[in-house]
């Protein structure tokens, strides 16, 4: 019997036993989610440079995923933190940036081979800026209402306890992710996300690590090429359901409700991200045409660069194509003169703001 106040060392291994198989409703939602995420992947491949948008969208995901854990910062604060060397950055902004770095670290690790337990450990360590490892035997962890791992409040779930038990469950999870080929990747992602959160292998950062795992699974299974599925926004908008349905799998084996939630999340998030990309690309195209007509000597690379993130400095576009920082600064100053960019001084540094892109991102926050 499941007891929310005692360590769930009886957590069933994967694959799950679905009592009546997949319902018609789940299959219909799976088809809709597959269509939407396929369209998202397709539109990303039509971009002149898909990586142009990845940083911006990944940062949005980092911000939203951190908000689920009650870590809040503003867009302005985040972009300032990225664009300057000012050490006076809020703890919340630092945590969001660590999340984004963790995402890229996981993707880089994925290029070397399949997802492993070590991949999850590295992602967690990056998120929390720690050398800690799997939760040790003596640490008591309980999940209270709202999804927080703290020592007081109404306990809704107590994860498995004991390093041996946790490692055994993680080995089973990784085997399921890498070798269970007959299951649709979206269903695999949803099931793996529940299992990881139920194992709760780390002292903190499990939610954020689990959401990065979602992206790694989709990329490993070739559903997406780049990390552009902004899933955390849906979870924020439906946060109570997220925690309720996670717990309902543990307490009542309610896989049906959980799978429907995650498939809806994929569909709605994919549709939303498509809309966001279309808005950004419309803005990019109109900016490109305007700059080509007004300042024809400015390289296409510069226009791409100012859409990589709303805040930019001359050093960000200095490299193989523009070797001189003075030349880079001249181009950015010229873009300010025609009101494509706005100049802003932050401390002792000068940054340039792509106001058109900023408005799009602020509108979708």
Image (spheres, helix red, strand yellow):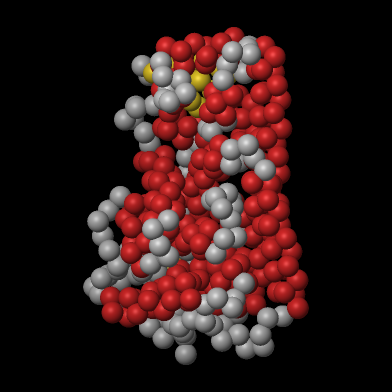
In the rendered view, would you say 1 is above or below 199? below
Q: Answer yes or no: is residue 351 visible.
A: no
The one nearer the camera, 263 or 293, is 293
The quadrant of the rendering that contains the C terminus is top right
Residue farthest along the front direction in this orientation: 320
Where is residue 235 drawn, in percent x and y?
A: 58, 57
- Residue 269, position in %: x, y? 65, 54
Q: In the image, is 137 to the left or to the right of 176?
A: left
Q: Is residue 275 above or below residue 325?
A: below
What residue appears at the point 64 percent right and 40 percent down from the top-left corner? Answer: 47
Residue in view at x 40 percent, y 62 percent? 113
Camera-nearest residue between 181 and 159: 181
Q: Nearer the viewer, residue 214 or 178?
A: 178
Number of numbered markers? 0
Residue ID at (46%, 13%)? 327
- Residue at 41% of width from left, 19% of height from top? 323
Whether residue 330 appears in this view of the structure is yes
**Left or right position of 298 against 105:** right
Q: Percent position (x, y) of residue 196?
A: 45, 70
Q: Position of residue 314 (x, y in %)?
A: 44, 20
């Amino acid at each position: 019997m499941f007891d929310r106040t005692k360590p769930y060392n009886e957590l069933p291994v994967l694959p799950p036993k679905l009592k009546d198989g997949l319902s018609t409703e789940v299959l219909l939602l799976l088809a809709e989610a597959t269509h939407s995420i396929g369209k998202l992947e397709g539109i990303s491949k039509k971009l002149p440079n898909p990586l142009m948008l990845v940083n911006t969208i990944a940062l949005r995901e980092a911000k939203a995923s951190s908000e689920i854990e009650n870590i809040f910062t503003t867009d302005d604060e985040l972009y300032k933190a990225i664009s300057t060397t000012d050490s006076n950055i809020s703890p919340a902004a630092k945590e969001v940036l660590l999340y984004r770095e963790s995402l890229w670290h996981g993707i880089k690790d994925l290029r070397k081979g399949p997802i492993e337990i070590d991949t999850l450990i590295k992602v967690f360590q990056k998120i929390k800026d720690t050398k800690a490892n799997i939760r040790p035997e003596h640490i008591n962890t309980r999940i209270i209402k709202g999804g927080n791992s703290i020592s007081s409040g109404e306990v809704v779930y107590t994860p498995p306890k004991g390093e041996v038990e946790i490692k055994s469950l993680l080995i089973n999870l990784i085997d399921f992710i890498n070798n269970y080929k007959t299951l649709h990747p979206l269903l695999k992602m949803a099931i793996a996300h529940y299992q990881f959160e139920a194992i709760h292998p780390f002292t903190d950062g499990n939610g954020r690590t689990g959401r990065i795992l979602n992206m790694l699974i989709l990329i490993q299974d070739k559903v997406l090429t780049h990390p552009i599925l902004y899933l955390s926004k849906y979870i924020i908008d439906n946060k109570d359901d997220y925690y309720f349905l996670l717990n309902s799998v543990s307490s009542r084996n309610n896989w049906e409700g959980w799978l429907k939630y995650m498939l809806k999340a994929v569909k709605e998030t994919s549709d939303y991200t498509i809309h966001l990309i279309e808005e950004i690309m419309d803005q990019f195209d109109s900016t490109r045409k305007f700059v080509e007509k007004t300042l024809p000597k400015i390289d296409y690379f510069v226009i791409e660069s100012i859409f990589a993130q709303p805040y930019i400095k001359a050093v960000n576009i200095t490299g193989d194509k523009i070797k001189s920082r003075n030349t880079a600064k001249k181009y950015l100053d010229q873009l300010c003169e025609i009101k494509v960019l706005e100049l802003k001084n932050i401390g002792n540094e000068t940054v340039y703001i792509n106001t058109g892109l900023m408005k799009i991102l602020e509108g979708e926050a």
